[in-house]
Image (cartoon, helix red, strand yellow):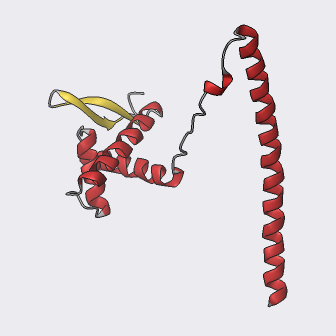
């Protein structure tokens, strides 16, 4: 049994070492690219202080979570048959998942995620904005008309 455990651990370590080498290569390339950008900035404006440029950090979306929200949004609109507001969609998604509708923080978070999913689905041509009681609502894109 120890041989199997050791073999699995060695294999995992081998994979990690390969990832580290790849990432170190990418890091070196990024440093070289940034040095080139710094050089161009200094050529254009020799007085510019590069140390004042703060890094921009981007949070990676949780892809599986966003995908499941997108599916839930499309399913909700499919079942509704009529345009729904983003908040209504979020409420129905929360209800279907058994989440606490009375929790304002969770409600805001779900509203943001559903809004993001709706906008993403709009760019994919899956949903469109539709009037709902004089306001913006969302409906499935009519596939036969397209």
Q: Position of residue 133 (x, y in %)?
A: 14, 31
Residue 112 in the figure: left or right of residue 66: left
Q: Position of residue 122 (x, y in %)?
A: 41, 33
Q: Residue at x 42, y 27 (%)?
A: 146
**Which image quarter: residue 121?**
top left
Q: Residue at x 61, y 26 (%)?
A: 53
**Which image quarter: residue 119?**
top left
Q: Is residue 86 above or below residue 106?
A: above
| Residue 49 visible in rendering | yes
Q: Position of residue 132 (x, y in %)?
A: 19, 32
Residue 35 in the figure: left or right of residue 135: right
Q: Position of residue 66 (x, y in %)?
A: 46, 49
Location of the N terminus by quadrant is bottom right
Residue 141 in the figure: left or right of residue 42: left
Residue 33 in the figure: left or right of residue 106: right
Q: Residue at x 23, y 40 (%)?
A: 82
Q: Residue at x 78, y 26 (%)?
A: 35
**Which image quarter: residue 47?**
top right
Q: Which residue is at the far top?
A: 44
Q: Nearer the viewer, residue 40 or 125?
A: 40
């Amino acid at each position: 049994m120890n041989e199997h455990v050791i073999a699995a651990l060695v294999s995992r370590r081998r994979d990690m070492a390969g990832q580290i080498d790849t990432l170190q290569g990418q890091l070196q390339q990024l440093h070289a690219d940034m040095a080139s950008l710094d050089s161009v900035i200094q050529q254009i404006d020799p007085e510019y202080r590069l140390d004042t440029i703060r890094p921009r950090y981007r949070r990676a979306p949780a892809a599986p979570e966003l995908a499941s929200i997108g599916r839930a949004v499309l399913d909700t609109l499919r079942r509704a048959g009529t345009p729904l507001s983003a908040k209504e969609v979020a409420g129905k998604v929360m209800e279907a998942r058994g989440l606490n509708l009375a929790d304002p923080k969770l409600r805001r978070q779900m509203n943001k995620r559903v809004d993001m999913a709706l906008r993403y689905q709009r760019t994919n041509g899956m949903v469109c904005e539709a009037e709902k009681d004089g306001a913006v609502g969302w409906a499935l894109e009519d596939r036969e008309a397209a």
